[in-house]
Image (cartoon, rainbow, N blue to C red):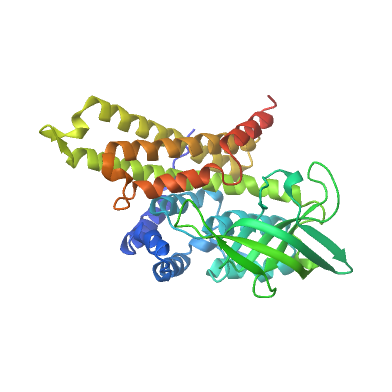
Amino acid sequence: MDFSLSQEQEMFRSSVRKFLDANGQTNIAREVIKNNFKPYKKAITGLSELGCTGITISENYEGAELGSLDLVPVLEELGRSLLPGIYLETVTLAVPLIEKYGTDQQKQKYLPQIASGSRTITLAWLEPKRGYSPEDVCVTAQIKDESIVINGVKALVPEGETADTFMVLVRSEEGENGEGISLVLVDRTENHLDIRKQKCLDETLQLAEITFENITVSKDQVLGTIHQGWSVVQEGLLHVNAALCSVMVGGMDRLVEMTAEYANIRVQFGQPIGRFQAIKHRIADMKTDLETARSLSYYANWALESNASDREAAIFSARAFISEAYIRNASHSIQIHGGIGFTEELDCQLYLKRARYYESYLGSPREYREKAACALDW
């Protein structure tokens, strides 16, 4: 079976890479560390103009109505450049969930703006000192007539200070095994939220803690059926994890490239270090991990798009392997670069920090191996 990308998809990849090259690639992330967001905003605007934000949105809502595989080249290029922001959460999580579970009113409100790049949506799931299990959802949502009153604190929210809309996982009634949980869309400009910036290992990413104190929203803002939001989120995890695999593959591809380049120009004992057997073996291991990860990523996205019977196993097993392979490649790259690999001068440390952030984002590799095993009825 051939899971390689089509000629049109590869051509689109070339356009995205050319644009990101012209805007500095990882320099965009480096400027964000310095609190200079102008290059990032320029990059996001340019990507929107290229059509990257509307790829999977229906034509009825000003999108291109393409599939998950058409997102792969874009996501790989974003991973390659370590682009900050919440393109991942907006396009690969919010869009498919709104398309499938949203009301006509929600689709009209959000999808055209996402397609144009004028609205971003992030996920508010984690709570202080809690995990990703349904029992850890403690932010309350009290139903009063046609409104919902939200109280509680969400932590480590990606782009919490700048996102236009939050997908908030709340407990709307008591229940077990995911029952009684709802997914609510909360618009930042329409509600007074207490937002506090939080530190992140990856300084290119902006995280925030959000306090909801008697925040009142309409019941029309519930995504899917009220009290049944856990199943909605599980569907979203398939989409976002398949996409995240592509992002990590993009980062791994750049690591292999830059490490091989360095091994060819760094001279020790009168010859390039790339001629030493130990270095050759290490780079070969990196390349093997990359190609394995790419194959798993392509299959996971194909399985998602074609609704294959093994899509859960394909996506979760890919996520578990690629998360760990990304860390291995970043660590090998630093080792091969030697002492300079640990400095801020090179990008090696940026990729390692991003890999470590993704390692536990939306769950750990161990949890995803368990999910894959369950999907295979093991």
Locate residue 197: give its quadrant.
bottom right
User: Which residue is farthest left?
Assistant: 270
- Residue 340: x, y in percent? 27, 45
Q: Please name the residue shown 38% across and 40% down the image.
A: 330
Q: Please name the residue shown 75% across and 66% down the image.
A: 221
Foreground residue among 357 and 342: 342
Locate residue 376: give its quadrant.
top right
Q: Is residue 274 above or below residue 107?
A: above
Q: Is residue 103 left or right of residue 119?
A: right
Q: Please name the residue shown 68% across and 30% down the image.
A: 374
Can the viewer see residue 258 in this picture?
no
Q: Please name the residue shown 55% across and 35% down the image.
A: 320
Can the viewer see residue 200 in this picture?
yes
So how many labels did they put on this image? 0
- Residue 31: x, y in percent? 38, 64
- Residue 317: x, y in percent? 57, 34
Q: In the rendered view of the protein, which quadrant contains the C terminus? A: top right
Foreground residue among 1 and 216: 216
Foreground residue among 251 and 7: 251
- Residue 137: x, y in percent? 74, 50
Q: Is residue 83 left or right of residue 271?
A: right
